[in-house]
Amino acid sequence: MAIELNEHQLKAIERLRTGSILCGGVGSGKSRTALAYYFMKDCNGSCKVNGQGSYSPMKDPKNLYIITTAKKRDSFEWEKECADFAISKDPESSVQNVVLTVDSWNNIKKYVDVSNSFFIFDEQRVVGYGAWTKAFLKITRKNHWILLSATPGDQWSDYIPVFIANGFYRNKTEFITRHCVYSTHTTYPKIERYLDEIILESYRRKILVTLEDDRETTRHEEPVIVDYDRNLYKTVFRDRWDPYDNEPIQETGKLFYLLRKVVNSDSSRIQKTAELLDRASTAIIFYNFTYELELLRKMCKDIRVPYSEWNGLKHEPILTGDRWAYLVQYSAGCEGWNCITTNTMIFYSQSYSYRMTEQAMGRIDRMNTEYKDLYYYKLRSVSPIDLAISRALSRKQNFNERSFLARN
């Protein structure tokens, strides 16, 4: 058994322990690093690394469970990585009869009774205190584990489940009592500030292992300003009137959907997208809504560019050749796949989520890409909604609709 590991991966393996968060950019090699740690450190085995050393069996073998996204599970990406360590779902063909299980976060509750095994939690999903987090905490009490994440936390509350799993706090109530001060000026619970952040910093340092990235790619993020219909925007926002169905707007969710529809369906946006695609020849295009997909489909047909799609209904592969577009919906396809055959990504519309945006950008920023320069074209107008989303993302935060309404 022989594997290749970069210097930054070897350093990370030495620092990892059960309960760690392995933090690295999308495509930085977290999966292989996690598996090497499991095999060589947690299970006390050895293998030939970069042509050095030799193989010896694991002294403390454990069954391996990987909880990941549904897309990664269905693409068998993890099985391919595990094959280099001779680990398989079939115990008869797996090293030392170790059993590999790969499943999605949606099914995490199935494994709450597993014990004396090793878990890799791939793609941070334990923010908040819902069913997934409760299952996560039950699993971590009886098993060794590490968590992989490109963006481990935007605020201290994001770390609560991992801090509890590491034994720093008994429960969420203890964390809130010791560290959270809530605002008295909002109608919904909002943390205004945190207390004793020096303690929180020390806990984070104990568990956070950063995977230094030695890739040579350079990201070029270029904002592309497009127009929007100001009168139609005022009709929706000021008059609370739906110009498409010709009726009053009753719900906040509908209001924001319509504001974005006015902005994102403007003809200047689709025209600029066509120009960018024509210049690049190949590109991945991210969008949010079905009406945007319809516009992008029509655009590709009009300019005679072959296209394929990844969304909630279609899971088509990226095309080959010198001219193509890959139309990807944020929520369905921002993670779990990669592409090294283009260096261009067009964000037709903005996501509310900083994490989702970062995950999307990583689809072409891979360690094995042949491109040095990667281009990200981010379309936005100067409408209040677009500007507010841009400001939130630039601060590495998610856009909040309630806050936007309070300020406008």
Image (cartoon, rainbow, N blue to C red):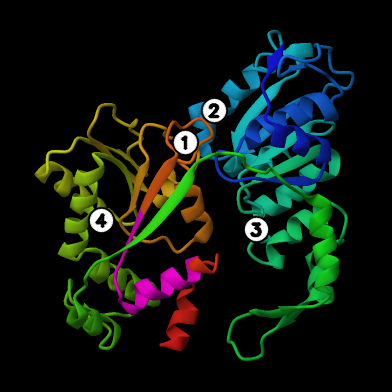
Q: Is residue 38 magenta?
A: no
Is the residue marked by circle 2 packed among few (<14), some (14-19), or many (20+) residues within 10 Å?
Answer: some
**Could you give the CA–CA distance between mark 2 and mark 3, rounded to whole angstroms?**
24 Å
What's under tag 2, amino acid-wise? Glu
Determine which of the numbered discs, if any, sits on residue 337 in the image: 1
Q: Is residue 181 visible?
A: yes
Which residues fall within the magenta stretch?
Answer: 377-393
Ranked by sequence position, the earlier of labels 2 and 4 is: 2
Residue 310 location (% of width, % of height)? 35, 40
Ranked by sequence position, the earlier of labels 2 and 3 is: 2
**Residue at the extreme left:** 302
Ranked by sequence position, the earlier of labels 2 and 1 is: 2
Nearer the camera: disc 3 or disc 1: 1
Nearer the camera: disc 1 or disc 4: 1
Classify mark 4: helix, strand or loop: helix
What's under tag 4, amino acid-wise? Glu
Left or right: where does residue 388 sit relative to residue 43?
left
Q: Residue at x 77, y 37 (%)?
A: 11
Between 203 and 158, the residue placed more toward the observer is: 203
Residue 238 location (% of width, % of height)? 28, 88
Classify mark 1: helix, strand or loop: loop
Mark 1 vs 4: CB contact within 8 A: no
Determine which of the numbered discs, if any, sits on residue 127 in the image: 3
**Residue receiving disc 4:** 292
What's under tag 3, amino acid-wise? Val
Q: Looking at the rendering, which quadrant does residue 268 occupy?
A: bottom left
Classify mark 3: helix, strand or loop: loop
Residue 263 location (% of width, % of height)? 26, 69
Q: Is residue 76 above or below residue 213?
A: above
Q: Residue at x 53, y 26 (%)?
A: 76
Residue 395 location (% of width, % of height)? 54, 69
**Could you give the CA–CA distance between mark 2 and mark 1, rounded to whole angstroms?**
8 Å
